[in-house]
Image (cartoon, coloured by chain):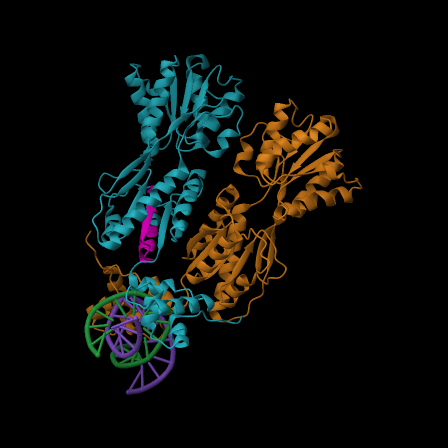
Chain colours: A cyan, B orange, C green, D purple
Amino acid sequence: MKKSRKTTIKDLAKALEMNVSTVSRALNDHPKINIKTKERVRQLAKQMDYIPNPLAQGLQRQSTRTIGVIFPTFDTNFFFRVLKGVEKVMHENNYQIIISTAGNSKEQEKEACKSLSAYHVDGIIIFLSYQHEDPSFLIDIQDEGIPLLFMDRIYEEIDANYVVSDDFTGMFETVCDFIDQGKKKIIHIQGSNSVSTSFNRTLGYQEALREKGIEENPDFIIHCDHESEVKSALRRFFSKYTFEEIDLITCFNDYFAFQALEYLKENNIKIPDDISLLGFANEPLSIYTSPKLSTINQPAEEMGEKASELLLDEIEHNKKGESYAYDTTRVKTFYLRREST
Amino acid sequence: MKKSRKTTIKDLAKALEMNVSTVSRALNDHPKINIKTKERVRQLAKQMDYIPNPLAQGLQRQSTRTIGVIFPTFDTNFFFRVLKGVEKVMHENNYQIIISTAGNSKEQEKEACKSLSAYHVDGIIIFLSYQHEDPSFLIDIQDEGIPLLFMDRIYEEIDANYVVSDDFTGMFETVCDFIDQGKKKIIHIQGSNSVSTSFNRTLGYQEALREKGIEENPDFIIHCDHESEVKSALRRFFSKYTFEEIDLITCFNDYFAFQALEYLKENNIKIPDDISLLGFANEPLSIYTSPKLSTINQPAEEMGEKASELLLDEIEHNKKGESYAYDTTRVKTFYLRREST
DNA sequence: CTGTTAGCGCTTTCAC
DNA sequence: GTGAAAGCGCTAACAG
């Protein structure tokens, strides 16, 4: 393994017989540098294939043109789609992306944050997945001047930019519409309560019933911590109720809906004639089921883009020392009718 | 925005009334440091929440505990699954991951490489997606001492670690088995020829026919650059041939197979009774179709893990200045029977 | 065992 | 306009 050294600013300076500081200034388009010198420097830089060392720059400038993204896991396709949006905007702006996961513990989540902060990322996009009784580590990060952008979950205690999809409204409006169309016997399969998205979707379901004056039956909210529990939960439910007593099944997400779909098919229930089925998220899979799953679209890529733009904005303001007003943008979700409703 | 400074090694040194170098050595477990001093230093470090600045360390050590991963795009779930494997191993070993995409041009692919090299990553995992007439930029990166690991595609010209799934064998063996079972009229929908995975899968198909003494009909290899072309390509094909003339449709990947599935359903062909259908890759979607798609499993996560381990290994050897022998590991693919065959 | 010093590659005052 | 010099936070000879 031969080691070829990268050309540094010193090499340029020597070759051009000027001081490194001049070269640096020329490269950074400093106003007081002779246009001719600038050109000479730039030309040689290109010729010698000079790329500034971001580590050195970062050390000096306290900025690395790097942002971090922390996901709960790498299991859900939704995150990948968000990442795509992030990637797009960040690379357009010449930022690198460092990814992390919270894994399966609060501790890991905290470690991921600290680690990114140590790496001097210029900002962090985070899908916080745990409830921390002491979220001071997050505030510490902000205090270090690293902007934090929270995705898909709002923390009242923390002042920051937020990008969330409007889970509540999406579910609320859609369920209202169904009720108006005469489907009044609706159950909801909810996910883990500690996940705010699940919580909000359930809330949307409940509020819609209330709005339309339908009495809530506690049995009609079926709790599953994981999609693998859906079928047996439904089996339990339908041992108490008949299929005729239900018009529509709403679900925390598309994966839950897929399980429900299988369950219904196994029981020879016609979808949507006997029972309608609604997912949530518009995962790519939802167009491949049969019948194709109706769902509530959650524009993942758009969320990633929006988050990146906000974060970049905050970073820029920070650099200039300007003040900055936080924003929480709710990305619109909407009902997507396919074949299961 | 209050800016709280991070505690540095200097702060520790001052507080402990010793020299920074002693502190540094204590922190790095240098053999010749008094065990007592080490303890004092470490305790204060923990107490003051000291985290070494990776930028400074990187600048000095020429190593950043950071690796880069370059994907062609963020479209295929397969990449996400690979990333999961990479994430697992890398974070176990305290490495950060920087991600990039080749986007849609050779130039971008090259830029991504250069950019990662500039960031002084310790290694790069790359799914090369273009054919570069001049791959010297890759060799340059190796010469800088940055190990390159190629995924899913072999470059004869470049000496490096490779991790590939055995596309050829997976397709070859599966098609042979089908032929043995009496399905002899087999077509193959191939993807872009410039993608080596597609190329190899096609080769597997062809070789299986040859092996079993079946004459190849050029019409039976249907070319599509993208899944969106599959339906019309099939329409064209089946205007020339009847459905009865075909036993089995093999596809470049599961997405292609989904399109074929839709086409067959639209034409009221019973799967697998009239025609069998085989995908490739075992994308998560394949279990949600109806009928469930039979496919050839490609262990994405495992590939990511294996790649990471090899890369880390090379990095470690490099650091110690030891010699290192490259390896190309073929990850086994295998036929996964579900309902479409 | 520990301190002194130089330097990684770059930016940025402060001079002139 | 440009040069000299200090310093970002850390490590690693070289001394003693």
Nearer to us in this view, A269 or B285: B285
Instruction: Give the magenta part as a residue range.
Output: A110-129
Q: Is residue A21 above or below residue A182?
A: below
Image coords of residue A240 (percent x, y) = 41, 16
Nearer to us in this view, C13 or A22: A22
| Residue at the image position 24 percent from the left and 45 percent from the top | A134
Can the viewer see residue B245?
A: yes
| Residue at the image position 76 percent from the left and 37 percent from the top | B180
Q: Is residue A201 above or below residue B333?
A: above
Can the viewer see residue A102?
A: no
Q: Is residue B310 left or right of residue B181?
A: left
Image coords of residue A208 (percent x, y) = 31, 20
Whether residue B73 is in magenta: the answer is: no
Of the 4 image quadrants, the one containing the C terminus of chain B is: top right
Image coords of residue B257 (percent x, y) = 61, 34
Residue B253, picture quadrant = top right
Whether residue A122 is in magenta: the answer is: yes
Residue C8, picture quadrant = bottom left
| Residue at the image position 35 percent from the left and 76 percent from the top | A18
Nearer to us in this view, A252 or A266: A252
Instruction: Give the total number of marks visible in the rendering.
Output: 0
Nearer to us in this view, B62 or A238: B62
Image coords of residue B297 (percent x, y) = 59, 42
Q: Is residue A268 above or below residue A135?
A: above
Q: Is residue A82 above or below residue B94?
A: above
